[in-house]
């Protein structure tokens, strides 16, 4: 019995993993109610079939692949058709329009004022009247365009000179070198070892985390700092 469960669980896990590799970026980039349900059903196929003695390994694989194929077809069609996209994913809904609360839209989306207040507080707004526009997105989150006096000033508003945006690259994580990031920066391990030697570090394993940014150079945290806190 345990052998059969182990085989079915392993096969189901691998098949599900492969299917999620195909659907993953589509499924989790923006979780809509449809995505949530299809993902949950996909996982239940494996869970339910493991304890059903009548279900074979091939039936588990077939069920996962067929369900995954149906999801892929729906996602493909929603990319091609605006009508189907609206049907499966829904449409954004304006809950506050020009500072006025749209009660009909709230009712249509099964929201009350307490829930709207909660969603606004999560965005950093503690009054309904701080928002000029509030849009309920397909995934259930809201986007807020605040009234002018409540908006966060930009660097342009404050007349701060424009500066080049720099990316940071993780070079060492948990004592291991990220060789791909090193190559993207045009460096090699000899350069990295030289940088570490200047800081009296002899081995990568002494480093918990290290990153490189053009304007600040190499910054790192050693394991000894972690143990001393």
Image (cartoon, rainbow, N blue to C red):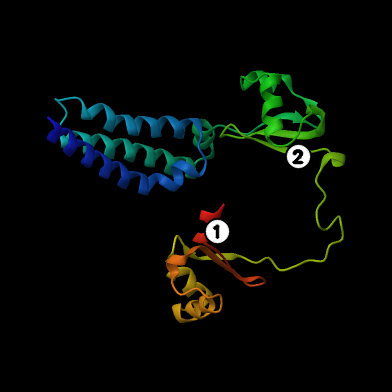
**Residue at left offset 46%, top offset 66%:** 206
In the rendered image, which quarter contains the N terminus?
top left
Please tell me which of labels 2 and 1 falls first in the chain.
2
**Residue at left offset 79%, top offset 38%:** 146
Foreground pick, 109 / 149: 149
**Residue at left offset 46%, top offset 81%:** 190
Q: Residues within 10 Å of mark 2 (few under 14, many from 20)?
A: some
Tell me which corner region of the image, top left, top right, bottom left or bottom right, holds residue 139.
Answer: top right
Tell me which corner region of the image, top left, top right, bottom left or bottom right, holds residue 175.
Answer: bottom left
Foreground pick, 60 / 220: 220
Foreground pick, 224 / 11: 224
Which residue position holds label 2? 145
Place of residue 74 in the rendered image (x, y in percent of width and height, measured from the top left): 41, 38
Which residue position holds label 1? 225
**Residue at left offset 16%, top offset 36%:** 57
Q: Callout 2: helix, strand or loop? A: strand
């Amino acid at each position: 019995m345990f052998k059969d469960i182990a085989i079915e669980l392993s096969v189901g896990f691998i098949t599900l993993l492969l299917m999620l590799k195909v659907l993953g970026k589509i499924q989790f980039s923006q979780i809509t109610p449809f995505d949530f349900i299809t993902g949950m059903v996909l996982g239940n196929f494996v869970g339910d079939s493991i304890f059903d003695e009548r279900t074979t390994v091939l039936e588990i694989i077939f069920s996962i692949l067929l369900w995954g194929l149906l999801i892929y077809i729906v996602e493909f069609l929603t990319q091609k058709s605006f009508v189907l996209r609206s049907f499966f994913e829904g449409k954004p809904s304006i809950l506050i329009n020009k500072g006025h609360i749209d009660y009909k839209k709230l009712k249509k989306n099964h929201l009350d004022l307490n829930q709207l207040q909660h969603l606004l507080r999560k965005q950093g707004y503690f009054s309904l009247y701080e928002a000029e526009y509030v849009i309920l997105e397909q995934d259930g989150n809201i986007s807020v365009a605040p009234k002018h006096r409540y908006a966060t000033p930009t660097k342009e508003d404050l007349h701060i000179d424009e500066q080049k945006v720099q990316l940071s690259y993780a070079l060492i994580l948990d004592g291991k070198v990220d060789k791909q990031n090193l190559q993207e920066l045009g460096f090699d391990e000899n350069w990295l070892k030289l940088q570490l030697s200047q800081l009296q570090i002899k081995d990568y394993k002494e480093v918990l985390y290290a990153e490189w940014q053009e304007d600040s150079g190499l910054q790192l945290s050693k394991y000894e700092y972690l143990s001393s806190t």
